[in-house]
Image (tube, rainbow, N blue to C red):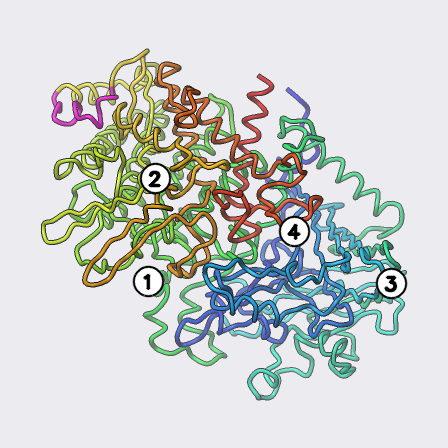
Amino acid sequence: MPMPTPEHLRLEEEARRVRNWKRWGPYLPDRQWGTVREDYSADGSAWESFTHEQARSRAYRWGEDGLLGLTDRECRLCFAPALWNGRDPILKERLFGLTGPEGNHGEDVKELYYHLDATPTHSYGKALYRYPQEPYPYQRLIDENRNRGLHDPEFELADTGIFDENRFFDLTVEYAKAGPDDNLIRLTVENRGPDPASLTLLPTVWFRNTWIWGCRHEGCTLKPSIRRDSDHRLRLQHPTLGGWFFEIEPDFSQAKQAFLFTENETNTRLLYGTDNYTRHVKDAFHRFLIQGEAAAINPEERGTKAAAHCRLELEPGAEAVIRCRLHSGDEAPEHPFGDGFDGIFRLRIGEADAFYREIIPQSPESEEARVQRSAYAGLLWTKKFYHYSVADWLEGDPVTAAPPDRRRSGRNAEWRHLFNRDVLSLPDGWEYPWFAAWDTAFHMIPFAHLDPSFTKDQLILFLREWYLHPNGQIPAYEWAFSDVNPPVHAWACWRVYKMTAAKGERDLSFLKRVFHKLLLNFTWWVNRKDPDGRNIFSGGFLGLDNIGVFDRSRPLPTGGHLEQADGTAWMAFYCTTMLAMALELAGTDESYQDIASKFFEHFVGIAEAINTFGGSGLWNDEDGFYYDQIHHDGHVRQIRVRSMVGLIPLFAVEILDEECLSRVPLFKKRMDWFLTHRQDLSQLSAFSEVSRKGGRHLLAIPSRDQLQRVLARLFDEDEFLSPHGIRSLSRHHRSHPYQLSWDHQTHTVAYEPGESETSLFGGNSNWRGPVWFPVNFLLIEALERYHHYFGDAFRVEVPARSGRFLNLAEAANEISRRLSLLFLPAADGRRPADGAQARTNDPILFHEYFHAETGAGLGASHQTGWTALVAKLLEDQGRRGRG
């Protein structure tokens, strides 16, 4: 057993609450403007209610944002750098991007920034921001994208030519902790261009405004303060955080205005034409630098927002290093800078290397290890503070204008109990600066290797009484908490339970805690999404956005109701997961055997329904595939779109072995009775695989023949098998679009391998062809379980018509290999995921989904959340290689 690394020891201290190592981290959101929680409009138009243009002048209500910043876990005190190249019309304090209505494919960040490294306690973190030396082309980006259509690619920052001849600055931001409350900050600015260039850098500290709203919930405080303490040090005082100091190395604090001061308050005169609450307001530094308003900053050198004023003149290729330190009064260093400062960085970097050598099986110099470490960095940098009290948001704050009455019955009105004030793993810090329930489940798989304690806490949190609805629903995402995401939370809990400890040492307390709350959620699904009790479910869009002929969350244009192959299969998958959990818990508490029987029999009922209800269920024997179907006026019409909807029935597969069953005799007795006396169910083709084979029982939706037929399509390169994974829609529909005609209207689904060519769900994601990591990952796991049952005797041709037959474990590994190749350099040195325009030496980005033909990354550009699953795939490949 290897000795634990220093980072592992810090994680242990944090988990045992010995030292608060995770009090500070990269928790400062990338975007707070344009979010639902900052929207106080009458019509719910969040993008227009709080714009990027307003953000520099208007105090946020529920959070903050900044450029690769740092904050405490309650977002009270924030740090982030701000920049000005002398030509921009605005001070660069936050990332710019297009709103949903502005982008031709929805919202889209228009910046170049990269998460380079991080440790789970945030003892070390490193990121890069690339800042042009020419005026930032804000309006051109808006105009060009507005003039483009759904069939056109997005117009990106690099397309403007602003990075030609390397005319940009690289700002490298690094954080290292000397102690839990002693944050070292190193900002390195390099002139990458061919000419001398100047830059103004403002290392900025400020308090989140928690004092102006008159709010009644926890987290509101009296006004804190920032004052000059010396020529290079600020004193900061907060009612709950206590006394702090911000220091900058003396070499960079001798300008005429060494520190700038203002208040983090709204400029109401600018925005609303009314008198300001205070003379000095949030946008003071912008007005001071760019508009030359000397009176904008506070001459009394106090406020709630302050910045060190650093003016840099850099020759081509030259760099400047600015060192800062943010620490509590209790952890004040005797010598804040000097050799000891950089020595701490060297120490923490070495400890980060040691930590990742323990969890990455490949050589640290390998491309595979580089991808994994980059994925982990993005995952950790996308932990953000998220605050949203729905009841207070609906009612409005006492000192502000009351919202319109209809707001109280509008968006999220049925979620008044929901109170978020936590550090959460978000999908993407800019494009999705809010949690999404099914995204979180997938994030936790790679997170389990980094930080088991945080992983379990996140999964538990979503089931706590201030998140979980009293009716049992898990909140989906802030635009509509009542939307329905696939029920994968139980799967994540079960996987994390098994991943975070060896058998016999697992955390049964965690498993019990989540299991009881998951029972409530499962019951919600059964009551709300199968109201007729037929075991055929209609879940809605289920996170797959535009995969259907029409919006599956809305009433059908045809009338009637939709019976969903994926909704039904997800519930079968939920059953098998809950069954596995119950059997595990029954090993030490026989009372769980009854509930295990319940999930076993419920699974059988769903398997029967999906295969036989109304004759053939949702199975189409002619096509050898599962489809959604419309039920209207006693008639049934299958929607014969070959999509991920019809592959999800493969996910619900579980194996029961005799060793397990011997420990749960009451369950085994009930199962044997069921298989003997309910032959109407147990002999169905869907359930014929519940048979004794080598001491194992297989629970699966498709029969062996059905499985073989679906897999023939899955591994056909003219259908689902892409060079980069499994497509979300069969390529068959490129030349054979599916059309549904009804009431003089024709609804079409065609193969779209890249960005969406429809505006359904805003057009900012696409499930009509591209490759998505979460469902590919579940498919890989399912094939591995099938192989565990069938062994090498079950083989499939991969690719179809190639003459190459693989067992199902090898077939699963082939999908994993193709997914991994998205991020590994090809012969020309380029990674497919980077697209044709990327520089070969640029850091790695992890996109939301991928072009099925080219592999180019699409959608959100920093969705390291579920795309970080590539780290788990590469880890498994590395361990197989070692074996």
* Real-space CA distance between mark 1 and mark 3, rounded to the nearest whole angstrom: 58 Å
- Give the foreground label among 1 and 2: 1
Name the spot of residue 519 as percent of width and height, x first: 31, 40
Pointer 4 or 3: first along the chain: 4
Q: Which residues are drawn in magenta?
A: 677-690
Type of residue at label 3?
Pro
Q: Quadrant of the C terminus?
A: top right
Asked if disc 3 and disc 2 are in contact, CB closer than 8 Å, the reply is no
Q: Residue furthest left?
A: 634
Name the spot of residue 822 as percent of width and height, x first: 56, 39
Type of residue at label 4?
Trp
Evaluate whether residue 775 shows in this view.
yes
Q: Which residue is mark 2?
A: 516
Residue at point 87%, 67% (across, down): 231
Q: Which residue is mark 3?
A: 196
Residue in front for this viewpoint, 402 or 197: 197
Q: Residues within 10 Å of mark 3 (few under 14, many from 20)?
A: few
Q: Which residue is mark 1?
A: 414
Pointer 1 or 4: first along the chain: 4
In the figure, 676 relative to 98: above or below?
above
Pointer 1 or 3: first along the chain: 3
Name the spot of residue 527 as percent of width and height, x first: 22, 48
Residue at point 55%, 34% (across, down): 820
Residue 56: image tag: none
* Real-space CA distance between mark 2 and mark 4, rounded to the nearest whole angstrom: 32 Å
Residue in front for this viewpoint, 358 or 825: 825
Evaluate whether residue 517 shows in this view.
no
